Amino acid sequence: MNLKDSDWNLKNNLDLVHFIRVMVEYSSYFIKYVVLKKYVMRSYLNSISYCLVFLIIAILTSSSSLFSQTDSERPVASATAITEVPTLDGEVQNDPAWQNVLPITNLVQQQPNQGAPVSERTEIRIAYDKNNLYLSAVMYDPNADVLIVTDSRRDASLDETDAIRFIFDTYHDTRNGFVFGTNPIGIQYDAQVDNEGQGNFNSNRAQGGTIGGFNLNWDGSWEVKTSTGDYGWSAEFQIPLKTLRFGKGNQKWGLNIQRNIRNKNEKSFWSPLPLTFEIARLSMAGDLIGLDLKTQGNLKLIPYVLGQSSKDFSSENADWKTDGEVGLDLKYSLTPSLTLDATLNTDFAQVEVDEEQVNLDRFNLFFPEKRPFFLENAGLFSVGSPGEIDLFFSRRIGISENGGLVPILGGIRLSGKQKNTNIGFLNMYTSDVDDEGLNGNTFTVGRVNHEFAGTRTSLGGVVVNRSRSQDRGDDHNTVYAIDSKIGLGKKAQIHAFIAKSNTPGISGGDGGDIAYRVRFNHSWNGWNNYIGYTQLGQDFNPEVGFLQRSAFRKFEALVFKVIRPKKDILGGLLEVRPHVAYRGFWDFNGFMETMFLHIDNHWVWKNGYEFHTGVNFTKEGVKERFEISDGVFVEPGTYNHAEFFPVAWTDKSKPVSLSYRGVFGGFFGGTRISNSLGMTARIGDKFNSEISFNRFDIDLPGGEFLTHVVRGRLSYSFTPQIFVQTLIQYNQSSDRFSTNLRLGWLRSANSGLFVVFNEIRDDFKQDNQLFTVKYSHIFDVLK
C-alpha cells in the first residue's frame, strides 16, 4: 500500500498501535509494581523517591530529539511608533494613520487544510504611541454577505463566529499573556492566560468560571470598533498601555494572531500551531519587536453603591426588608508589572448564580468561582489538581458550606511579576454571621513562582492559611506546598506538587497530612498523552481548598490522537480522535474504590457536526452504606459494570443547534439511563437562548428513582454593552425552582449599572425574593 495515498495515513495508525501497546505494557508494570505492591507503599519517603527518579529521568531526556524543537522558524513582526492617532471607527483602509505601517499578511491554516495559507487575504497592523497600543485588521472575504455572528455579549465565544484574536506575551516568558479579540459587530473579548492556558485539567467539572489557565473573566479597559462592506470586514483596537503589564524600556513580546472564517470552518494563525493547540500556546508564538515603551502610573478607584430589597416568605409575618451598601475597590500599579488591589465591603450581587447539579455519587460536587475580584490573576494562585485537589479555592472566602453568603469586610491582593518571578499575596477578612453561628476569619495566601528563562520550567511555593479573626485559640489551618513544571522542549512537560497541611487536633503521623502528584504530559502533532500518579493522605486537610474525595492513591493515563483524512470521505469528515483514558483510585489498604476505563472516538465533520462513540468500563468499591436519593441506599460491595456513552451535536454556528449526551449501562448493581438534551437558538446576534433537560433514571437493588434538572438561559443584547439575561432552573432532586434575572449596562472593565432579581421556590412554594440595584464607576486618577 502507498502510504502517501492512504485516506487514513496508515503510518499514523501504525504509530498509534505501537504507542498504545507500549503505554499498556508500562501501565501494567506501574500498577503491578508501584501501586499494588505493599512494600513500595510502606512509607511516604519511598513514594517520593520514585517520583524524584521519574523527574530526574525526564530532565536527562529533555535534550532528546523526541522533545526538541528550534525557534528558527518563529515569525517576527515589528510594531511602528506613530504620532498621528488613528480614528477609532473600524474604517482602516482610508485612515492615514495606518498608511505607513507595514501589514502582517502571512497567516497559515490549522483547519481544515493544515499548513496551507489563509484562504482569504488578511492584513494586520500594529502601532503604538506613548499611551496606547493600536491594532488594525482587514479581513477580506468575497462572501461578506454571509459573515457569521452568533452573539453580541462581551466575552461571548468567538469559536463559532467570524473573528480575529491577538495574544501578547508581554513578559516574553512563553507562558503568560493577554488575549484581545472581536467579531464583525465589535464585541469585546479579552482574557488572561497563565501557563499557556493549561490550568484546567479537570475542567469538565466546571460550569463556567475559571480554575486557572485561561481566565475569560478578566476584563480590561480598552476599546474596539468594526466596519463591514463588500470587501469583508475590518476592526480597530485601542488598548491603553496601563491595561497591560510589561517590563521597562525596549520590549520584545510574544505574539500570535488567529483569524476564523466560519462559513469555511477555517482557523488560521500567524505563528503556525500543530493540531490540538490553541492560541494560548505561547511557546509557539512569534516575536513582536520595535516596542519602545515608557512606564506609566496607574491608580484607579472603583466605588460602588448598592440597594437591596428582600423578603423571606418562609418566616412568619414576612415583610420586605430594604437596606443599602457602599464599597470601594482600588487598583494601583506599584511597578509596570506589579499591581496592588484593595477592596472594602466587597459585594458580588451582579454575578450569575450557580448552575444546579445532581450528585449521583458519594463524593463532593465542584462549583466554580465566578466572582471578578478572585478571578483576576487566578492562575497565579492555583496549585494542585484543579477540580480534584485545589490547595486554594477562593469560594471558601465569603461563601458558607451550605451556599449562604458571608460578608467580606475587605482585603488586599498583590500580584504580578518581578523579572522571572511571579509574586502573589492575598489577605481577606470576613465577619461573623450570628444567624448561622459562623465566626469571622482571616484568609492569607502567599505565592511565589520562578520561571527559568528560555525553558518551560518553573519552581514555586505557596502558603495558605485560615484563622479565626478573634480569640483564635486552636481555630486555624495552614497548608504549605511546593510545585514545579519541568519543560521538555515544546512537546512535553512534567507537573508536580507536594503539600502538607497543619491542623490543631489532627496528628498527621506517617505522612498522613501530605498530598502529592506527578504527571507527565506530551502533546504534539495531533498527540495528547499523559500519565500520572496522585496520593492524598488520610489526614490531609486544606480548609481553604477543595477536595473531591479524601484519602486515596490514584493512577491515571490518556492516549489521544487526532487523525486528518487526506481525502474527502464520509461526507466531508474533517478528523477522527481515537483515544483511551484510564483512572483508578485505591485506599491505603489496597482496596480499589473507583476504576474508570474510557475507550472512545470523536468523529468531526467539516460542517460542524460531531459524534462521540464511547464505551466505559467501571468499577466502584463501596465501603460504607450511603444514601444516593431519598430512601434509596447503596450497600457496601464491589460493582463492576460497562456502559455506552454517546455524545453528539450539530453545527453550533447555525441559528438553531442541538446537543445530546447519554449514558446507558450498569450502576451500583443496577442500571442507569441518563439522557441530556440541549438546544441553542438565536435570532440574529441580539437574542440567544439555551435550553437543557437532564434526566436520570436509576434502578438499583435498594430501590429506584427518577430525577431531572431543567435549565433555560435567555439573553438579549441591545448593544455589546447593554444586555438582559435570565437563568431559570428546576432541580427535581431538591425540588427547587430558581430564577436569576440580570440587566447590565456595562462601562469600562465590567463596571456600570446592574439590576438583579433572584427568586427561589422550594416545592414550588415561594421561599424568598431578592431585588438588587448596583452601580460602580472607574475613576482613573492618574489619567
Image (cartoon, helix red, strand yellow):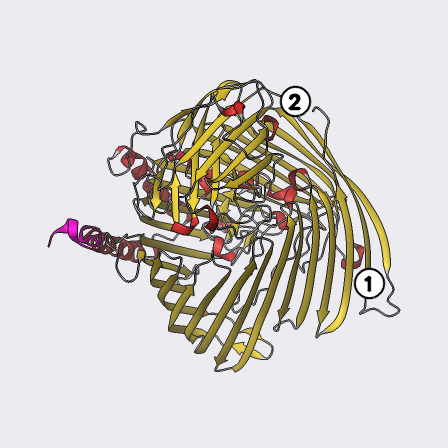
Mark 1: secondary structure: strand
Q: Do the residues labelled 1 and 2 touch (CB within 8 Å)?
A: no
Sort mark 1 into few (<14), some (14-19) or many (20+) by Cα contacts within 10 Å.
some
Q: In which quarter of the image is residue 558?
A: bottom left
Residue type, label 2: Gly
Residue 380's place in the image compared with 565, above or below, is above
Residue type, label 1: Lys
Residue that appears at 36% across and 44% down: 51
The residue singled out by tag 1 in the image is 311
Q: Where does residue 115 sit, x and y in percent of width and height?
A: 29, 41
First to last magenta residue range = 1-13
Q: Can residue 95 be seen in this view?
A: yes
Mark 2: secondary structure: loop
Instruction: Name the foreground residue: 676 vs 120.
Output: 120
Residue 99 as seen in the image, left or right of residue 300 = left
Q: In which quarter of the image is residue 124?
A: top left
Q: How far apart are marks 1 and 2 (CA)?
A: 46 Å
